[in-house]
Image: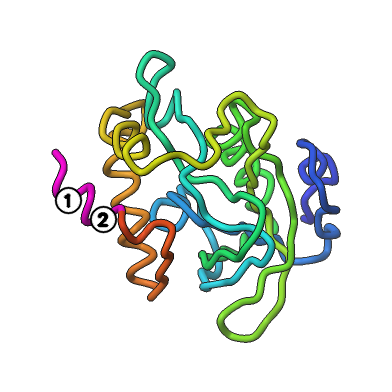
């Protein structure tokens, strides 16, 4: 049974979601790469242009608290981002979207978009992705290295330590052969700081 239109229109988007008969994909660039938390039919490396991966979101739930926030990834404007695209079976779209809404959208710091993704096998698809809302109070913007380390070291929330989140994301990027000059300094910095 094809997913209902209500699933695809449940949250604001700056792009039109795929039609009900089109395959439904999700693009992961942070913890979704190494801990998707949903069932999928395919897992394929992909490239998103127009946004880059950035530690630019204060976390006060999953990897921090209001009193002691952590810092997590967001897709911010400009550049490009290599991540993982997951194809969801039609009968799993509604449950997957509900799960992702609970996981990613509690505070609405992200906006749902459905951009074009170039897959490593040459296909071009559209996928659900979460880009950061720069007007949201949790948007941290570009921070000094020292402040990033402080927030990552102090953050711990419902999903665990912020440091583990960052190191797992960096390990997933390394596994994919992704080098990101804006984040490459983090692994040695975090490995030396306890």
Q: Is residue 104 magenta?
A: no
Mark 2 vs 1: CB contact within 8 A: yes
**Total numbered badges shown on the rendered structure:** 2
Q: Is 50 placed above or below 15 here?
A: below
Instruction: Specify start and end residues of the magenta stretch as a single range.
Output: 186-194
What is the quadrant of the C terminus in the image? top left
Q: Is residue 151 left or right of residue 194?
A: right
Is 98 or 158 nearer to us in this picture?
158
> Where's residue 16, x and y in %?
85, 53
Q: Residue at x 41, y 64 (%)?
A: 181
> Where's residue 49, x and y in %?
66, 67
Q: Residues within 10 Å of mark 1 (few under 14, many from 20)?
A: few
Going by the picture, which residue comes out furthest to the bottom? Answer: 122
Distance Cα–Cα, label 2 vs label 1: 6 Å
Q: Residues within 10 Å of mark 2 (few under 14, many from 20)?
A: some
Q: Is 41 placed above or below 16 here?
A: below
List the residue tagged with mark 2. Answer: 187
Q: Residue at x 57, y 39 (%)?
A: 99
The part of the image, by quadrant, that contains residue 154 is: top left
What is the quadrant of the N terminus in the image? bottom right
Q: Is 63 placed above or below 145 here?
A: above
Q: Is residue 111 left or right of residue 82?
A: right
List the residue tagged with mark 1. Answer: 191
> Where's residue 126, x and y in %?
73, 65
Kind of element beneath mark 2: helix
Q: Is residue 193 magenta?
A: yes
How does the figure colour the protein chain or chains?
Answer: rainbow
Q: Residue at x 51, y 64 (%)?
A: 83
> Where's residue 155, x and y in %?
32, 29
The part of the image, by quadrant, that contains residue 86 is: bottom right
């Amino acid at each position: 049974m094809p997913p209902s239109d209500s699933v695809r229109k449940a949250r604001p988007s700056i792009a039109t979601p795929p039609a009900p008969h089109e395959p439904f994909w999700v693009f992961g660039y942070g913890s979704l790469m190494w801990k998707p938390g949903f069932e999928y039919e395919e897992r394929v490396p992909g490239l998103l242009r127009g946004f880059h991966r950035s530690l630019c979101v204060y976390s006060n739930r999953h990897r921090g608290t209001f009193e002691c926030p952590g810092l997590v990834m967001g897709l911010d404007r400009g550049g490009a981002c290599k991540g993982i695209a997951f194809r969801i079976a039609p009968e799993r779209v509604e449950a997957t979207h509900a799960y992702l809404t609970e996981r990613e959208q509690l505070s609405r710091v992200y906006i749902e978009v459905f951009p074009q993704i170039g897959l490593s096998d040459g296909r071009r698809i559209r996928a659900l992705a979460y880009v950061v809302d720069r007007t949201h109070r949790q948007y941290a913007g570009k921070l000094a290295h020292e402040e990033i380390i402080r927030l990552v070291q102090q953050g711990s929330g419902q999903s665990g330590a912020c440091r583990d989140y960052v190191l797992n994301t960096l390990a997933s990027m390394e596994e994919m052969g992704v080098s990101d000059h804006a984040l490459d300094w983090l692994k040695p910095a975090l490995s030396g700081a306890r």
